[in-house]
Amino acid sequence: SCGRHRCEEACCPARKPGSPDAEGRHVCRLVCGRRLGCKAHNCDNICHKGPCPPCRHIITHELACTCGRTVLLPPLPCSTPPPACPHPCSLVRPCGHPTGDHACHTGECPPCTVFVDRLCAGGHTLVQNVPCHVTNRSCGAPCGKPLPCGNHVCPERCHAGPCPGAGPPGAGCGQPCKQMLPCGHLCDRKCHPGTACPTDCRQAVPMKCACGRKEEAMPCMKYQKLLRERAGKRHSLALDALPTLDCDAACAGEARLRGLAEAVGVRRDHQWQPDSVWAPELLETAKRRQADVRALERVLHEFLEGPKVNHLFGVKPKPERDFIREVASYYFMDSSVLERSVYLTKTKASAKPSPLLSDAMNNPQYDPTEMACQQLEKYPGSALLFDRLHDAVKEWELKEFLRAFTGHFTLLWHSPTVCVAVFQTAQAREDAQQALRRQGCPHEARPFSAAQNAGLLAAIVERRRPPPAPRPVPA
């Protein structure tokens, strides 16, 4: 009858379904035994349906709070809770901080909210004003811990526990390899420890014709094969022996127009060789290091005008190496780092930029940001918008993908995750977007419209505008 127990009588006449039970054979007479609400005793009634009655046991001893200053005297019904105590808590926290900020209670104390200085989750720096109960607080800096692959570090923000993507020792981490290949490009495969980088580089190498009007891209491995075939047993090539495209009828027509313009004394700038636009950040660095800029330009000009194809700078610290390589890219020179030394190589397109960095940094009217805004007004479709960048993306990574357009575009940053690349023509922007797709650039770029993004453009200009000069204090 209880629905919980089974009949244990052998050959019970009421065992069959539908049999009459006039004698009450299937009324359960076992003890209930269920746990009562006090959680200390069991129900001793005959098995029944429905809830059990309250516990009938009596507490015969004093019932005190945790600190012992508030007491209930017996007799007390079973399951009576400890009395509420108005006095401050007297427990000792594991952290050692006082517990007088809350009343006496049963169980564990609430989390400690005293502000302390605590080492961040990644062990980088001391974070101030952290609630005591918070054990893992990120400092916001990049993690930087070496990954088991041995080639990369964790790119995530400061965190606790194992780094994401960290597999067993020797396993790939999933990041791009970016090891330097013999050709000078970076390996674009995913991290592959234990296996050599491929020798058949497929990155696009821009090639121009002799006059510079026509430009096409060729896979690097094919370009390197042409170099080896032309070099033969020699280790270097003269500039006039580097592979180039053949000029066509349009090139001949352009040359005739330039000759006619020079004959009549009219300057006609070549549309494929516009004036260089120096990066705003590089320009600011140059203004602080004017002597270094002039010294570097003297070395680059002597190298450019001399017969040597290669030039090796001595051992330099990393900031100095980065500065030399960025300036050299505006001369269309290839650069690489060998044992902390910068190794430059002239190309067919190597030439002095116009204006020189030393001239631009001393010209108060040379403003790359203003020039980029004017370019957007003149050519509305000449810019690309990167608005989904990862926080860890560096400016040099974007410039590496746009290397073929060095000096012909300006990066305007709105925030660490949003920037606008302004090119000199709408056609150059389209070519750059195609180049990003060919190289498998992981950062999404889409055409930027100044009319539709006027607020964003105004914020960029305002961010780069210098602060107003302080007003003179009247005497």
Image: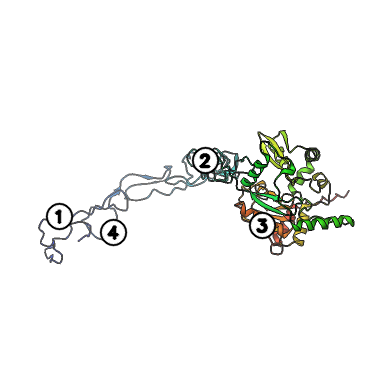
Q: Is residue 450 left or right of residue 66?
A: right
For the residue pair 389 and 79, the one nearer the viewer reads as 389
Q: Disc 2 residue type?
A: Pro
> Residue under circle 1?
8
Mark 2 or mark 4: whose residue is earlier in sequence: 4
- Element under label 3? strand
Mark 1 or mark 3: whose residue is earlier in sequence: 1
Label 4, label 1: how far apart the Cα atoms are: 25 Å
> Residue under circle 4?
51
Q: Quadrant of residue 437?
A: bottom right
Please report contact status of discs 1 and 2: CB closer than 8 Å, yes or no: no
Q: Quadrant of the N terminus?
A: bottom left
For the residue pair 13 and 402, the one nearer the viewer reads as 402
In percent of width and height, residue 11 lies at 9, 58
| Crowd tier of the residue under label 1, counting other residues whose Cα lies within 10 Å: few below 14, some 14–19, many 20 or above | few
Mark 2 or mark 3: whose residue is earlier in sequence: 2
Mark 1 or mark 2: whose residue is earlier in sequence: 1
| Crowd tier of the residue under label 3, counting other residues whose Cα lies within 10 Å: few below 14, some 14–19, many 20 or above | some
> Residue under circle 2?
98
- Element under label 4? loop
> Residue under circle 3?
385
Quick check: can you spot residue 312?
A: yes
